[in-house]
Amino acid sequence: MSSDAPRSRTVEWEDPAPPLAASRAMDGLTYLRALIAGELPPPPIARLLDFTLVSAEPGEAVFECEPREFHYNVLGVVHGGVACTLLDTVVGCAAHTTLPAGVGYTSIDLTVSYLRPILSTTGMLRARGRVVKGGSRVIFAEGVLEDASGTALATATSSLLVLRP
């Protein structure tokens, strides 16, 4: 195939309504572990950007993503929005692990620092999120996006609002 050949990608996802309904009856950690075990399908954003939740512990979550050419921006590097979205996801899921059934969250703010460029040749990325300070109204979390050798590529801090029913 010529390098000039058009490229394509097909994205498929499952209806997000059933897992969302199921999540309301589970605490956050149980819900994320059900996603990891394949008992529930991942959310559509994970399929779209190729994120995989690989572990969840109390106050911590880890995702992986292999950067690909379809993540590129006009400069020929992985778009910063991919790193930002991955970090937003991992800090949010870290916060989610601390929440009881029926309680949600939303980001109040997210600050991302980009440290190094990411290319399709960078290899597997690992994003780790952890809760810095839990709370019943606001949760503070931080995340780091690393390459396979553990070199930090981007970092994030976030405040998340706890949403009670």
Image (tube, rainbow, N blue to C red):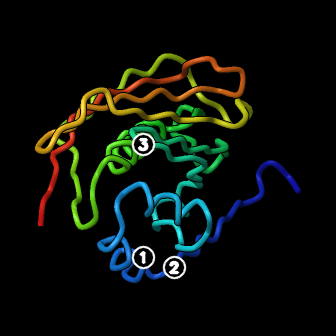
> Residue 140 placed where, x, y %?
24, 32
* Res. 114 image quadrant: top left
Task: Count neighbours of disc 1 (C-alpha within 10 A) and say few if under 14, some if 14 to 19, many if 20 or more.
Answer: some
Residue 73 at what x, y percent from top left? 51, 40
Kindly identify the amino acid type of the residue bearing the numbered disc 2.
Answer: Glu
Residue 14: assigned label: 2
Say which of marks 1 and 3 sits in front: 3
At numbered mark 1, what does the secondary structure look like: helix, strand or loop? helix
Q: Residue at x 80, y 48 (%)?
A: 3
Q: Which of the image's four quarters has the N terminus? A: bottom right
Ranked by sequence position, the earlier of labels 1 and 3 is: 1
- Dot 2, how many residues are within 10 Å of its Cα: few (below 14), some (14-19), or many (20+)? few
Quote the CA–CA distance across marks 3 and 2.
27 Å
Callout 3–callout 2 Cβ contact below 8 Å: no
User: Distance from label 1 to label 3 (Cα)?
Assistant: 21 Å
The kind of residue on which mark 3 rests is Pro
Residue located at (42% from left, 29% from top): 143
How far apart marks 1 and 2 lie (CA) works out to 9 Å
Residue 58: image tag: 3
Do the residues under discs 1 and 2 have CB atoms within 8 angstroms? yes
Picture disc at residue 19? 1
* Residue at disc 3, secondary structure: loop
Drawn side of residue 14 relative to residue 121, left or right:
left
* Residue type at tag 1: Pro
Q: Residue at x 52, y 29 (%)?
A: 145
> Does residue 78 lie above or below 20 as drawn?
above
Q: Position of residue 91 (x, y in %)?
A: 37, 39
The residue at the point 38 percent across, 77 percent down is 22
Q: Nearer the viewer, mark 1 or mark 2?
A: 1
